[in-house]
């Protein structure tokens, strides 16, 4: 008969509930290794059974350390699980491992060692404990000396990162990371907007002008004017700064250093926009 100490030890090792730990130890005749395997197989069964379910909730976290910043999302099915302390702890552990190993891809993160297996195994194990589908998503990274990250309202559903080319007061990076969260830019500047996006937006602007009955010889000028508005809304440096409408983001950064600008940014959210 499993003792309470053995049950607690198994819980510490697997994160499973006390009831599941007790059942596993009974089934394993108090063999700790076998009990761990029973809990792991339960996770695999749950993961397989719920593979077609939608994982739309979850936990999004970001972190910067030693010139490397990353965002990662561990997704699940319900908000109840997403807010569970052990689920958040697992997400943080995965992010910490990804940062420590400076992972560049999601596959690299999944293959990292964790516990008695890999990160991918740990997620399957947690799926068995909660009974919900779980999956990693939204992994992105930035390398550089001046990276700021922002977890929107500390609610673990929207995170951003931004890299600056200059070492300025941390308020500048933080403010721009908040800007990215609020305004969801598609690029740093006009030069970074993909050509297919430029073409599509120009055609939309031109077609709209025609629908409004504008003369054909004015269509090009009108479309170009509307593209300027598009760049102002979609390009980070062109955007109106949310904390001071008299400034663009570019102008705000120049207050920190006349040559300060953005070199990269990342954003991930679980919410539909």
Image (spheres, helix red, strand yellow):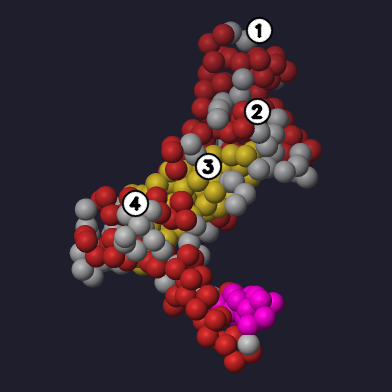
Q: Are marks 2 and 1 in contact (CB under 8 Å)?
A: no
Q: How many neighbours does mark 1 have within 10 angstroms: few (below 14), some (14-19), or many (20 or more)?
A: few
Depth check, front residue: 35 or 99: 99
Q: Nearer the viewer, mark 3 or mark 2?
A: 3
- Per the image, the residue denoted by label 3 is 157
Q: Identify the mark nearer the N-term, 3 or 2.
A: 2
Quadrant that contains the N terminus: top right
- Per the image, the residue denoted by label 2 is 129
Q: How many neighbours does mark 4 have within 10 angstroms: few (below 14), some (14-19), or many (20 or more)?
A: some
- Per the image, the residue denoted by label 1 is 1
Measure the alpha-carbon separation of dots 4 and 3: 22 Å
Secondary structure type for disc 2 = helix
Q: How many neighbours does mark 3 have within 10 angstroms: few (below 14), some (14-19), or many (20 or more)?
A: some
Q: Locate residue 192, reporting x and y percent.
A: 46, 74
Q: Locate residue 58, reporting x and y percent.
A: 59, 39
Q: Nearer the viewer, mark 4 or mark 2?
A: 4
- 123 is higher (above) or lower (below) than 2: below
Depth check, front residue: 73 or 8: 73
User: In which quarter of the view is residue 235 placed?
Assistant: bottom left
Q: Identify the mark nearer the N-term, 1 or 3.
A: 1
- Per the image, the residue denoted by label 4 is 243
Q: Residue at x 63, y 87 (%)?
A: 215
Q: Identify the mark nearer the N-term, 2 or 1.
A: 1
Secondary structure type for disc 3 = loop
Report the span colored magenta: 198-214
Measure the alpha-carbon separation of dots 4 and 1: 63 Å
Q: Identify the mark nearer the N-term, 4 or 1.
A: 1
Q: Residue at x 66, y 29 (%)?
A: 130
- 173 is higher (above) or lower (below) than 120: below
Q: Nearer the viewer, mark 4 or mark 1?
A: 4
């Amino acid at each position: 008969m499993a003792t309470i100490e053995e049950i607690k030890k198994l819980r510490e090792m697997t994160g499973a509930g006390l009831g599941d730990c007790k059942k596993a130890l009974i089934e394993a005749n108090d063999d700790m290794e076998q009990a761990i395997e029973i809990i792991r197989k339960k996770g695999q069964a749950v993961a397989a059974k719920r593979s077609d379910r939608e994982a739309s909730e979850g936990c999004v976290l970001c972190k910067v350390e030693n010139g490397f910043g990353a965002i990662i999302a561990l997704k699940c099915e319900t908000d109840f699980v997403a807010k569970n302390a052990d689920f958040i702890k697992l997400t943080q552990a995965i992010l910490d491992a990804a940062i420590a190993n400076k992972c560049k891809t999601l596959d690299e993160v999944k293959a990292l060692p964790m516990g008695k297996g890999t990160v991918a195994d740990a997620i399957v194990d947690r799926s068995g404990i909660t009974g919900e589908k779980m999956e990693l998503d939204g992994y992105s990274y930035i390398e550089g000396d001046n990276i700021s990250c922002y977890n929107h309202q500390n609610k673990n559903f929207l995170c951003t990162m931004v890299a600056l080319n200059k070492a300025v007061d941390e308020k500048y990076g933080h403010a721009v990371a908040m800007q990215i969260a609020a305004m969801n830019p598609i690029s740093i500047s006009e030069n970074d907007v993909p050509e297919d996006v430029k073409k599509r937006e120009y055609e939309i602007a031109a077609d709209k002008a025609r629908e409004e009955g504008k003369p054909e010889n004015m269509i090009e000028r009108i479309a170009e004017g509307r593209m300027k508005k598009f760049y102002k809304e979609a390009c980070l440096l062109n955007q109106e700064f949310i904390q001071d409408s008299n400034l663009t983001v570019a102008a705000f950064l120049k207050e920190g250093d006349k040559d300060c600008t953005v070199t990269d940014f990342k954003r991930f959210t679980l919410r539909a926009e």
